[in-house]
Amino acid sequence: MKDIIFIGGGLNYAGAIVATQHGLDVMLVEQNMEHIGGTCLNNGCIPSKHLLHLAETEVKLRQKPFTRHKDRLNLKVAVQEKNEVVQKAHKSIQMQCVSAGVELVEGKGYLVAPGKVEVDDTTYTAKYVVIGTGSHPFIPDGIEYDKETVITSDEVLNMEEFPSSIAIYGSGAIGLEMASFFGACGVETTLIFRHEHISKKIHPTLLGNIEKGLEKLGVHLMRNTSVLEAKAHNKRAKVTTDKDIYEFDKLLVATGRRPNVDVIKTDSVKVGKGIVTDEYFETTLPNHFAIGDCNAKLMLAHAARAQALNVVQTILGKKERLNLDNIPKFFYTLPLQYAAIGLTKTALEKQHVEYKESFFPLSALALSHLTDATDGAVVLYADKENFLIGAEILAPHAEELVGILSATLVAEMDVKSALQSIYAHPTFSEAIERALRRF
């Protein structure tokens, strides 16, 4: 009998390594070792950020000092580079697991009974089971997904040639990032979404500036539109909406993801939107946990890793609640990126929490005028006692800047304490200090 069996080799592997390093006998079950590392590494954040970092150069080359010819990013070479990075990462993860002493088993794992995991025709037992089976793209009714013309994030990140036109249905992180990528690379790009704005959760000023940035890239925003049907037609995507019928070379379906819950083959574990857990990620079956996308709490790679490590600490007798509010959220739009942490304006107002807001526009920094960042801003939120409770950032590499606020929230700093930090000049981190002084 093992101490822990981890089902799913996404960010679960981090927990498996740490558990083994603490002397536990651990097995990691992954259905395809060529996919170890999960969606983020293979079909998500690593491939998309590789393409977006390249596309960022395309955006910069639009600036006045550059003379640009008609050539553009070589997508085939970019994808080849991405594949090489991912393959190296696979080997690195496997080596880390083996070096730590984690037993790797390839195959589809199912939880068939308390402490029993079935892989092919073999049943393994463990005192604890940690499920981290991730998620899959959601395809709405009426859309005929064929992986060629009507595609998801699984295919879009492996395209080796640019289409002449692409429609993207959905304005979540995947939709916004891919709209930025294709728009920056000169592809005729249409972003279709069902509401008036791309999000209901972002500060209204930042939201407007994100939309303006997309339109500046050449992205057509098709607001208040639902796709009723979509299918391949004469090698193009025929898209029927509630307003009209359109044709594009490709349709990227980016309407969210759904948890992979088919791993559960016992009635002892309750399944709802995802695998149901308590605040410590324990399922309705004691000593059985679910982390990451499959529990549907927060579909982010770093959230999955944090949850896996938190569960291992619980198993080791160091039980501590992980505050999901303090996990950064971001998406990599162009030319500016958006990040948030803690309680934001929409959440505070929804919960009727009394708060103070400090808004600092990046246009007040000379640096922003040199880097096409004048539409950016830092927004900080504090409670009535002046303790920081949240932040939103629209800035170059906001995903890096939000780390400063992450440390501030975890340390439970008030505004006066946070102002003890000195920020380098000229940087965008200065905007945090300027915002603090506006409370």
Image: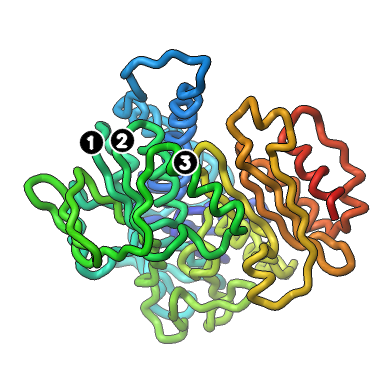
Q: Is residue 92 left or right of residue 265?
A: right
SS of the residue under disc 1: loop
Seen at 63% across and 41% down, the residue is 395
Q: Position of residue 138 (x, y in %)?
A: 33, 64
Q: Residue tagged by mark 1?
A: 164
Q: Is residue 21 above or below residue 268?
A: above
* Three-letter residue code for mark 1: Ser
How far separated are the C-alphas under marks 1 and 3?
25 Å
How packed mark 3 is, by other alpha carbons closer than 10 Å (few <14, some 14-19, many 20 or more), is: some
Q: Residue tagged by mark 2?
A: 187
SS of the residue under disc 3: helix
Q: Look at the image and tell me whether residue 264 can be seen.
A: yes
How far separated are the C-alphas under marks 2 and 3?
22 Å
Q: Quadrant of the C terminus?
A: bottom right
Q: Is residue 120 above or below residue 13?
A: below
How far separated are the C-alphas under marks 2 and 1?
6 Å
